[in-house]
């Protein structure tokens, strides 16, 4: 979204500056607004243009070390014919006061109230710390031999972590399709499925294709389904670059009927995406409780639909990049309670390693949760939830 919004900016340096300003505003929005409100007689409307341009000016001054006169000069043209005097006065007052931002950003009040009972004080502190800066870049390797050439650190087999800001297209192995960008947490669902050994798997909500490529590289025969034709085109492009194979189908997971059953079905369901706030801090400001409730209901419906496509004896995987229990544990527990032909499933091997070695993941029953603070010393990980279910070999008799 940010890339498309800045596509009209010709110089890469200018695009980079625009990205940095936008990211800074979104990460520190609560604290920037607190500063603005401290310098006005009454709070400006949340959507007021004056508030928006003051956020931009303050982000440049306080986060990017832009001189005050330059920061204000970039925003005043945005309020031509409007509240220029107000913007100039508030910014000047704050600069003269020598205001600063806290070491770590504060969360929006609504998010804080929602997450504190779930993740506790330590979890909130971990979230704030990880929000303060751009996260590192994770790569999933098609061929492990690229690890040495790429450098960085490896936290799991077939994984490399590089510093934030690394130029992806200039890395060794890009043209050769030796790897793809994928947060280490997002690689978990396909890792849990292990080696394919030519078995079949249905990858629902597949775009942009990271899990599709993982599954193909692990020896699964993959059918990748996504409702968006344009996003599925990106999956096809990624498959072509990496030389991996999968059948791609445009289809809505809520209504898609595959016409056959699979050894495994992976549902990476549409969700609030609150777990990816490190990379996309805008989710903190748009994932409202009403949205989360609606999405959880949709996830339950998609999971129930997907369950029909699993062979008896097969495995169903449910995943969301969310920190909301309603979208994770709640959906998984509800599914088991209403589908008596399924039972919890725990794999013994994960991509060539003992499943217990995933020590950055909380594991309970058939649930895996990447919680706030996971891998903090190595740069963190996105919030993620995975549940696995086994379809019983013999279906229970219909109730009388």
Image: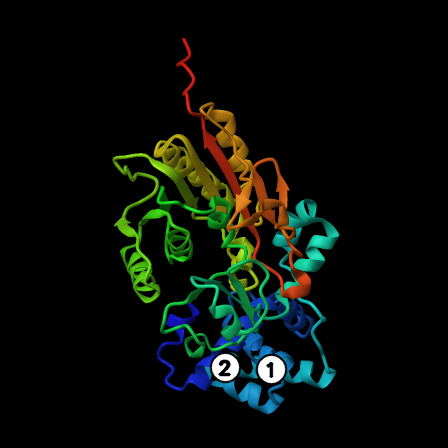
Q: Quadrant of residue 314?
A: top left
129, 244: nearer the viewer: 244
Residue 81 seen in the current view: no
Q: Mark 2 points at which residue?
A: 17
Q: Residue 209 carries which label?
A: none
x, y percent for residue 330? 55, 36
Q: Check contact, mark 1 vs mark 2: CB within 8 A.
A: yes
Decide: is 152 above or below 313.
Answer: below
165, 20: nearer the viewer: 165
124, 160: nearer the viewer: 160
Q: How many labels does the image show?
A: 2
Residue positioned 51% across, 83% down in the render: 75
x, y percent for residue 73? 53, 89
Q: Earlier in the sequence, mark 1 or mark 2?
A: 2
In the picture as drawn, the residue positioned furthest to the top comes out as 400
Residue 398 seen in the current view: yes
x, y percent for residue 282? 52, 62
x, y percent for residue 340? 47, 23
Q: Quadrant of residue 126?
A: bottom right
Q: Of helix, strand and loop, which one carries label 1?
A: loop
Residue positioned 49% across, 34% down in the render: 389
Decide: is 191 above or below 37.
Answer: above
Q: Mark 1 points at which residue?
A: 64
């Amino acid at each position: 979204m940010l890339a498309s919004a800045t596509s009209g900016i010709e110089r890469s340096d200018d695009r980079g500056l625009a990205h940095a300003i936008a990211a800074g505003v979104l990460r520190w929005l609560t604290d920037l607004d607190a500063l603005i409100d401290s310098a006005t007689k009454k709070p400006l409307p949340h959507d007021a243009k004056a508030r928006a341009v003051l956020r931009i000016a303050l982000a440049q001054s306080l986060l990017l070390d832009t001189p005050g006169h330059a920061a204000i000069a970039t925003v005043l043209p945005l309020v031509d014919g409007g509240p220029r005097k107000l913007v100039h006065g508030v910014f000047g007052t704050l600069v003269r006061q020598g205001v600063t931002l806290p070491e770590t950003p504060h969360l929006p009040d609504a998010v804080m109230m929602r997450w504190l009972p779930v993740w506790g004080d330590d979890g909130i502190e971990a979230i704030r710390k990880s929000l303060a800066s751009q996260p590192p870049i994770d790569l999933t390797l098609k061929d492990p031999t690229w690890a040495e050439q790429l450098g960085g650190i490896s936290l799991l087999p077939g994984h490399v972590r590089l510093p934030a800001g690394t130029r992806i297209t200039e890395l060794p192995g890009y043209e050769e399709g030796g790897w793809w960008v994928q947060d280490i947490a997002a690689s978990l669902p396909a890792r849990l499925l292990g080696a394919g050994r030519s078995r079949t798997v249905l990858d629902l909500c597949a775009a942009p294709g990271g899990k599709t490529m993982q599954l193909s590289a692990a020896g699964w025969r993959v059918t990748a389904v996504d409702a968006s034709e344009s996003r599925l085109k990106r999956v096809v492009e990624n498959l072509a670059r990496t030389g991996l194979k999968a059948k791609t189908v445009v289809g809505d997971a809520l209504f898609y009927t595959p016409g056959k059953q699979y050894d495994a079905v992976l549902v990476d369901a549409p969700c609030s995406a609150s777990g990816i706030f490190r990379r996309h801090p805008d989710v903190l400001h748009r994932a409202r409780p009403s949205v989360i409730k609606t999405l959880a209901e949709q996830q339950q419906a998609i999971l129930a639909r997907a369950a029909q496509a699993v062979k008896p004896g097969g495995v169903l995987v449910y995943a969301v990049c969310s920190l909301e229990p309603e979208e994770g544990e709640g959906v998984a527990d509800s599914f088991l309670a209403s589908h008596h032909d399924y039972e919890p499933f725990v794999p013994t091997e994960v991509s060539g390693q003992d499943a217990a070695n995933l020590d950055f993941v909380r594991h309970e029953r058939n649930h895996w949760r990447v919680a706030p603070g996971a891998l903090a010393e190595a740069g963190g990980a996105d919030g993620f939830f995975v549940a696995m279910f086994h379809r019983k070999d013999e279906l229970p008799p219909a109730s009388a």
